[in-house]
Amino acid sequence: MLYQGVNRPGWWLAIVILAACAEENSFEHQSGPLAEPSGARQGSVSGIPGGEQAPLNIEEPTSVIRGPYTAEALAGEVGDLLTEFADRLQVRDIEGLEQHLTPDFLGHALGRMASGKEQTLPLGALRRELQAVQGPGLDCQAWLADLSALVSNWNQVTQAELHVLEAEFERGNPSPYGVVTFRVQLAGITLGGKQEALARRVRGAFLRKEGAWALDRALLEAGFDLERTGPGFVDVTNSTAVNQRGPAFGQPGNDSEGWNGAAVADVDGDGRLDVFLPNAMRGYLYLNQVDGTFREAAQECGLLGTGGGTGLVFADFDADGDQDLVMGGIGWSNAGESGGNPLRAFENNGEGHFIEVTKQAGLGANMPALGLVAADFNGDGFLDLFVAGYGRMEAMRNDNWIQATNGAPDRLLLGQEGFVFRDGTRQAGLHDRDWTASALAADLDQDGDMDLLTLNHFGVNRFWRNKGSGRFERDEQGLGGSQARLTFGGTLGDFDRDGRLDLYLAGASSGTGRRMFAALESTGEVDLSRSLRGLAQGNHLLRGTLSGFEVMPDAAGAGAAGWAWGTVAADFDLDGRLDLACVNGFVTGELPADT
């Protein structure tokens, strides 16, 4: 989808993304309710009359299920309930929520608060810290009335998500009772155009009700509200004609386990950025028009039949002043077997028309190329190409979760005069069998040559220092830690403005994974638990130093952002500081709770 910034582009997206990420991280490590603020009235919560309230407390399970798999299966059942709850909130079906509450339900109001500690954010946005109470709660009807008042004030509910953070369950067959801490994130636009969002951490007691879970108590622990008048980003996908659609993953015509990439460049030399999107059936080239709309022109520009492309990059490989294209995909070439997509090259004729020159460029080998990076690594004046080798997941799974060694080898292809490459991998010292999803290149140690970061699945990320003339040495401590990761992408930028590049990594964030890996400690697998936690931790911010990078704590505010695929740094709110945007999501199964 394409979004256009309105009234100082992107400020709202940046604020909501980073504020929500910061709160998600703090929610997952915070315990216990907030103290009641001085002067708060016991008789009123969020405007609901005090006569409808009663004391609220949650009893802990007396005999807790300790096995990580059994406990997580139960947490998944509650997670399914919360997903259905969120779906009903999205369409404002408040009456339908009652079936998920027990008849004796009591809970703190979740709606927007009239008072609290306020913080002014850029461009007039306001954040209000929740002044939660420990005492009375609302009965079922009053609690639902509070939610109804919230969503009824919104012309559109733009976000409704409820996710399990922590869970403990009483022993039993089946378990009759559980205490589950969950996160609530809601956002909407009022009739007057004001954008509002809220996040809540709730400690809930769940009972089995006729074989299914139901919420019996909801104790509010922490939260905040956000608001701002005026739009931030507006969806202009259809109005700008960047709206081609293809079959969803798993449907006929889209059954590949390789995800497709995207590339942006001024391919026709008119000074405007164009967009190329490949997929297995055909490529789409959107040429940017003078009025801000786009025209699809893949066929006339020679990029229609490119096939799927997981890694692709525009660059002036032949040094003639225009943007050429190299594209990789999921391919393989083993002893006696070869198939999939080759590494392909397309030369720009200077007018935005592309001619395939794969054979002339010395390319065409089948390899699983998930990411490509173009840079002059050996300093000879020609652009080289780093190919991030992944693996053929449908044929052979990773052989280890902490440090897999059966991924496809990375390749360094050295550029020659005339858009020609030769393999220089071995001489460069870039030999490993990691499952590399993407890579970044920059002069990270400020010694005048291009260093390399390889971002991996099922193992640690790598910092390769260029020792001169394109020969690399692996810095084992350069990325500030040795935890295995599931990193999909990253971006470099000087976020703290100290003159050194910092690193933001986008990866898989899984509450299920975090809970299961943490539960391993209770079985005595302390080292294994700590080694695996990085696989589910989500995004990471690393600060650049003289010796490499150091991992910043979650309090830096850019941690979990869902199942993240890629990220970009830009000054969205035009305040002179780099902001971050991150794309995320995953395949939805037949049931809404399945991913």
Image (cartoon, rainbow, N blue to C red):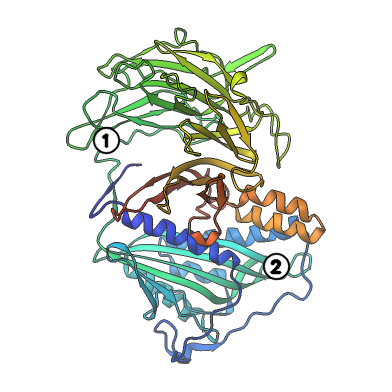
Does residue 432 appear left or right of residue 151 in this picture? right
- Quadrant in the picture for residue 174: bottom right
Between disc 1 and disc 2, whose residue precedes?
2
Q: Residue furthest front?
A: 447
Q: Position of residue 159 (x, y in %)?
A: 41, 58
Crowd around label 2: few <14 · some 14–19 · many ≥20 (10 Å)? many
Are dots 1 and 2 in contact, CB under 8 Å? no
Instruction: Name the residue located 47 percent from the left edge and 78 percent from the top edge.
Output: 109
| In front of the other: 261 or 316 | 316
The residue that disc 2 covers is 168
Instruction: Name the residue located 53 percent from the left edge and 60 percent from the top edge.
Output: 84
Q: Is residue 190 above or below residue 114?
A: above
Which SS class for mark 2?
Answer: strand
Inspect the image, locate mark 2, and give the three-letter code of the amino acid beneath it: Glu
Q: Is residue 73 visible?
A: no
Instruction: Name the residue located 24 percent from the left edge and 41 percent from the top edge.
Output: 239
Label 1 to label 2, Cα distance in Å?
49 Å
The residue that disc 1 covers is 241
Does residue 418 appear left or right of residue 173 in this picture? left
Q: Is residue 561 above or below residue 26?
A: above
Inspect the image, locate mark 1, and give the three-letter code of the amino acid beneath it: Ala
